[in-house]
Image (cartoon, grey):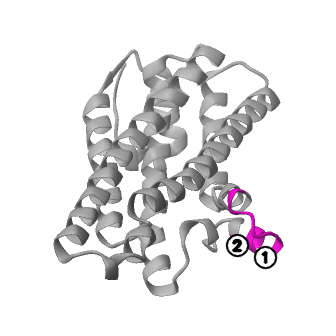
């Protein structure tokens, strides 16, 4: 049986598509979708950088820079964010797929399909950040969809706010989806799958908090 990857169809008819993926002996369109998603991630992050999201360190010193230096700084910021988007997409697609493959023995290509859905949903989440920042002045770590806004009332420690800011309603949906997907293909006990998926996301939230925390210092060092 041949399965042709169509992301939106998986979201709209999940049970049927999971059955088809499970039975599939051949998968088509996998790498084409990977390339499209990576390009989409680069575009989303470049667009966010172009709109100035996360560029507070540059904006704060804009008055002390010449016009040419300021424009050059913005260009390098956009290029840097674009490269980050590329690395982010590649990481989400291939690293968790490898870890779950080693854990469960589910065919790697079928796990990449799962991560394609995860990446598409995460990119949609990042698009939601744009109006929140532009119209409400809320950065991602204090989004109303995350626990960061609660953490910001309890502490002023940036790392903790970044950590809880990485935990969102959409991230919780992704955890549920991954557990459902892996359970369909694996004979492992469900509670073991839950523990491993949550543990992976916990490490991801720690990494996101560390990246955001160190990123602010790097930008300050470059442009401060």
Determine whether, in the image, residue 41 is placed left or right of residue 138: left
Identify the residue at image location x=32%, y=36%: 34
Question: Which of the numbered marks, if any, corresponds to residue 153?
Answer: 1
Quadrant position of the C terminus in the picture = bottom left
- Judge from the rendering whether residue 192 lies leftward or rightward of residue 138; answer left or right: right
Residue 25 part of the magenta segment = no
Q: Is residue 43 above or below residue 65?
A: above
Identify the residue at horizontal 23%, vertical 61% (top origin): 75
| Left or right: where 43 falls relative to 116 | left
Is 152 magenta? The answer is yes
Write the start and end of the magenta stretch as one range. Answer: 149-159
Q: Position of residue 185 (x, y in %)?
A: 60, 23
Q: Which mark is residue 55?
A: none
Residue 175 seen in the figure: no
- Circle 2 packing at 10 Å, graded few (<14), some (14-19), many (20+), is many
Quadrant including the N terminus: top left
Query: Is residue 129 shown above or below 121?
Result: below
Q: Kindly identify which numbered label has been placed on residue 149.
A: 2
Left or right, 78 with respect to 60, comes to left
């Amino acid at each position: 049986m041949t399965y042709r990857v169509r992301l939106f169809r998986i979201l709209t008819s999940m049970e049927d598509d999971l059955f088809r993926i499970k039975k599939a002996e051949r998968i088509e369109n996998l790498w084409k979708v990977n390339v499209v998603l990576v390009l989409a991630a680069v575009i989303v992050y470049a667009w966010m950088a172009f709109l100035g999201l996360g560029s507070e360190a540059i904006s704060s010193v804009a008055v002390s820079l010449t016009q040419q230096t300021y424009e050059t700084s913005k260009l390098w910021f956009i290029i840097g964010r674009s490269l980050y988007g590329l690395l982010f997409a590649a990481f989400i697609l291939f690293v968790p797929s490898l870890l779950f493959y080693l854990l469960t023995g589910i065919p790697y290509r079928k796990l990449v399909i799962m991560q394609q859905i995860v990446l598409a949903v995460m990119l949609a989440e990042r698009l939601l950040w744009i109006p929140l920042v532009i119209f409400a002045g809320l950065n991602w770590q204090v989004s109303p969809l995350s626990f960061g806004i609660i953490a910001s009332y309890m502490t002023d420690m940036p790392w903790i706010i970044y950590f809880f800011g990485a935990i969102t309603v959409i991230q919780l949906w992704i955890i549920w989806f991954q557990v459902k997907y892996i359970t369909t293909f694996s004979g492992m006990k469900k509670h073991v799958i839950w523990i491993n998926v949550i543990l992976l996301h916990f490490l991801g939230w720690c990494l996101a908090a560390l990246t955001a925390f160190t990123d602010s210092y790097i930008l300050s060092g470059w442009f401060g």
